[in-house]
Image (tube, grey):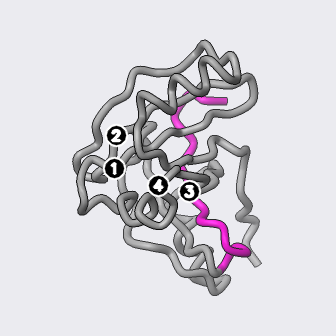
Amino acid sequence: MSEFKIGPLNHVGVAVPDLEAACETYRSLYGATDITTPFDMPDQGVKVCFVNLPNAQIELIEPLNAESPIANFITKNPKGGQHHVCFEVRDIDEAVVEMGKRGATVLGKPRIGAHGTMIVFVHPKDSNGVLIELMETPVGAH
């Protein structure tokens, strides 16, 4: 078996129906002061921002439209909720190959994610019901 393994937890993705309201919740309820400016990712169909914490981030994700992959999640969970957990990997292409060898279903092809680095998702059926995002470690991150 390959030496491949996941690296550090990068972020937890939380789908929300209203990004601004969610940011305010993290500010007023939890005292989070380091929240990035929201930005649109039209290719992914989402608007995102990050709540920066000492050891990881929370990625807040709002659907841009009804065709967004997040829109269906919000329909099923109107108040929002945990969408995915993201782990860093050294090499996204190696991760995709290893996931296949190990019997996991990779959803789609690697693409640029919100951190500007390559990502893929692993189907929740392969991870105890949790959607896993694998993200190539950003250059200079560690």
Tell me the mark number nearer the camera, choosing from 3 and 4: 3
Q: Residue furthest top?
A: 33
Q: Secondary structure at mark 1?
A: strand
Q: Is residue 103 visible?
A: yes
Residues marked 2 and 1 touching at CB (< 8 Å): yes
Q: Secondary structure at mark 3?
A: strand
Q: Amino acid at mark 3?
A: His
Alpha-carbon distance for marks 2 and 1?
A: 6 Å
Task: Indicate which disc, 2 or 4, sits on the residue closer to the N terminus.
Answer: 2
Q: Quadrant of residue 84?
A: bottom right
x and y, in percent, of residue 81 in the image: 58, 52
Q: Secondary structure at mark 2?
A: strand
Residues in magenta, as a range: 126-142
Task: Indicate which disc, 1 or 4, sits on the residue closer to the N terminus.
Answer: 1
Residues marked 1 and 4 touching at CB (< 8 Å): no
x and y, in percent, of residue 30 in the image: 70, 23
Q: Is residue 93 magenta?
A: no
Tell me the mark number nearer the camera, choosing from 2 and 4: 2
Residue that mark 1 sits on: 63
